[in-house]
Amino acid sequence: MSSAKQHITFGVFIPQGWKMELVSIADPVMKWQKTIEVAQLAEKLGYDSIWVYDHFHNVPRPAHETVFECWTVMAAISQLTTRIRLGQMVGCNLYREPSLLAKITSTLDVISGGRLDWGIGAGWYENECRGYGFDFPEPKVRIAMLRECVEIVRSMWTNEETTFDGKHYKMVRGNCDPKPLQKPYPPIWIGGGGEQLTLRVVARYADYSNFGGTPQEFAHKIEILKAHCLAVGRDESEIKKTWSPDVFIRRTEKELKAEGSLSLRGDAFDNWQNANLVGTVEQVSEKVQKYI
């Protein structure tokens, strides 16, 4: 969900398997059909965007259950929809070289007719990184790598050739053709709410921010982001603010309490409800207003 001057857009995550949401379907082909079904239904219902995660195995630990790969899903769904925007919440910079990301994203923007929202983050899932053979450096290194990645991708999207001599990435006369359809380039979403490092990168490079939490926590992050924008000389209002909560709605509070907490992190029901859209229709509608 994103807001700008009281205008709200709504997106929805399509089933991908990361949160075990496809576990009740045995056949991987039928799991994929469910992914298609939800994506097309979201477009039919008028949602503005659909989203996938960039993960390879289930959370909170590998369960040997299907997880469809992010960019493969994006490419396929781009050919099965016509209007809805396509985003990743968010891509993990540790999994692909920035030059490859530039090529992947520009290709997707072209084949989708200019519907890409590029989501990128520093990476956080150490278990997954180790399991797939990726290095997992300390936070300040991951953030520095993220910063260089965004600079490289943005340069390759807009320049004929890119030469980059950074601490973590180096390239000479790299090109990216075709260029994205969206000009000057697709919107850049940077996920994460780390107050000292991540939000400073958001302030410098992002078109959209994304962080979670209660309304009070969300407002606090915005204040921190404002301070970083001031430090880098950017107007904070240029960055659209987004929130991606769990959504769980029932007709009555009794029905909600009977279900209990569905938090994958094991949060108590009240904590889960406070930081997400969990409630009756009336409660959820009221909650949305607190983030605008």
Image: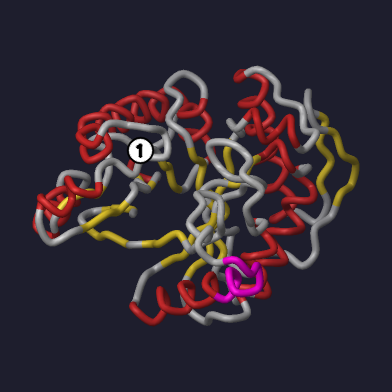
Q: Which residues are magenta?
A: 26-33
- Front-most of residues 221 and 248: 248
Q: Quadrant of the N terminus?
A: bottom left
- On the image, the x and y values in percent for residue 65 come to 62, 52
In which image quadrant can residue 140 be found? top right
- Front-most of residues 134 and 67: 67
In which image quadrant can residue 213 be found? top left
Asked if the stretch drawn in magenta spans residue 200, the answer is no
- On the image, the x and y values in percent for residue 112 come to 61, 74
- Front-most of residues 231 and 103: 103
Q: Within 10 Å of the Cα at label 1, are there few (<14), some (14-19), or many (20+) other Cα atoms? A: some
Question: In the picture shown, does residue 187 fall above or below 200?
Answer: below
Side of 84 where 271 appears, left or right: left
- On the image, the x and y values in percent for residue 227 come to 35, 24
Side of 292 where 165 appears, left or right: right
Image point (59%, 45%), residue name:
58
Image point (74%, 34%), residue name:
131
Image point (84%, 55%), residue name:
175
Question: In the picture shown, does residue 72 fall above or below 40?
Answer: above
Side of 287 where 101 appears, left or right: right
Question: In the picture shown, does residue 248 fall above or below 83?
Answer: above
Q: Tell me the amino acid under the disc marked 1.
A: Gly
Secondary structure of the magenta portion, mostly?
helix
Give the residue at mark 1.
212
- Front-most of residues 239 and 285: 285
Question: In the picture shown, does residue 2 fall above or below 215?
Answer: below
Asked if the stretch drawn in magenta spans residue 28, the answer is yes
- On the image, the x and y values in percent for residue 257 come to 17, 45
Which residue in the rendered view is the most extreme toward the right? 172
Side of 53 where 275 appears, left or right: left
Mark 1 lies on a secondary structure that is loop
